[in-house]
């Protein structure tokens, strides 16, 4: 039903928002962070940015083998926002 779908979307958004700081923290502990952020800034497609973050491993949540694509996308946006300051 519509209500169930809306509840699921809100829950997914809340989980993504909670996990983005984990991704950002993992990026900060990466010794190749500066180089990778430079590469990320050069990518213009949001899909390719998401794929790049997924490949870095930053969006891999500890205890999980799978990459959360929503977290990777939100993390890329957060990293690009802070990198442009």
Image: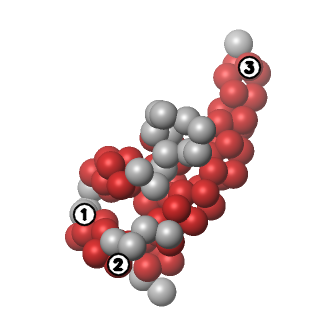
Q: Earlier in the sequence, mark 1 or mark 2?
A: 2
- Residue at 43% x, 68% y: name it: 30
Q: Earlier in the sequence, mark 3 or mark 1?
A: 3
Graded by Cα atoms within 10 Å as few (under 14), some (14 to 19) or many (20 or more), the crowding at tag 1 reads few
Alpha-carbon distance for marks 3 and 2? 42 Å
In this picture, is 85 found above or below 25?
below
Residue named by callout 1:
43
Alpha-carbon distance for marks 3 and 1? 36 Å
Q: Is residue 59 left or right of residue 31?
A: right
Q: Nearer the viewer, residue 8 or 75?
A: 75
- Residue at 72% x, 35% y: name it: 11
Is label 3 or label 2 in front?
Answer: 2
Residues marked 3 and 1 touching at CB (< 8 Å): no
Res 69 label: none
Residue named by callout 3:
4
Q: Is residue 46 visible?
A: no
Residues marked 3 and 2 touching at CB (< 8 Å): no
Q: Nearer the viewer, residue 54 or 42?
A: 54
The image quadrant of residue 15 is: top right
In this picture, is 27 found above or below 5?
below
Q: Is residue 60 left or right of residue 19?
A: left
The image quadrant of residue 76 is: bottom left
Q: Earlier in the sequence, mark 3 or mark 2?
A: 3
- Residue at 50% x, 77% y: name it: 82
Horizontal and vertical percent position of residue 71: 53, 47
Residue named by callout 2:
34
Horizontal and vertical percent position of residue 84: 42, 82
| SS label for mark 2 | helix
Horizontal and vertical percent position of residue 36: 31, 69
What is the quadrant of the N terminus in the image?
top right
Colour scheme of this structure image? Answer: secondary structure
């Amino acid at each position: 039903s519509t209500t169930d779908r809306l509840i699921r979307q809100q829950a997914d958004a809340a989980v993504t928002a909670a996990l983005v700081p984990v991704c950002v923290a993992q990026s900060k502990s990466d010794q190749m962070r500066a180089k990778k952020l430079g590469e990320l800034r050069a990518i213009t497609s949001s899909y390719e940015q998401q794929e790049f973050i997924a490949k870095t491993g930053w969006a891999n949540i500890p205890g999980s083998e799978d990459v959360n694509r929503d977290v990777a996308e939100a993390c890329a946006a957060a990293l690009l926002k802070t990198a442009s300051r």
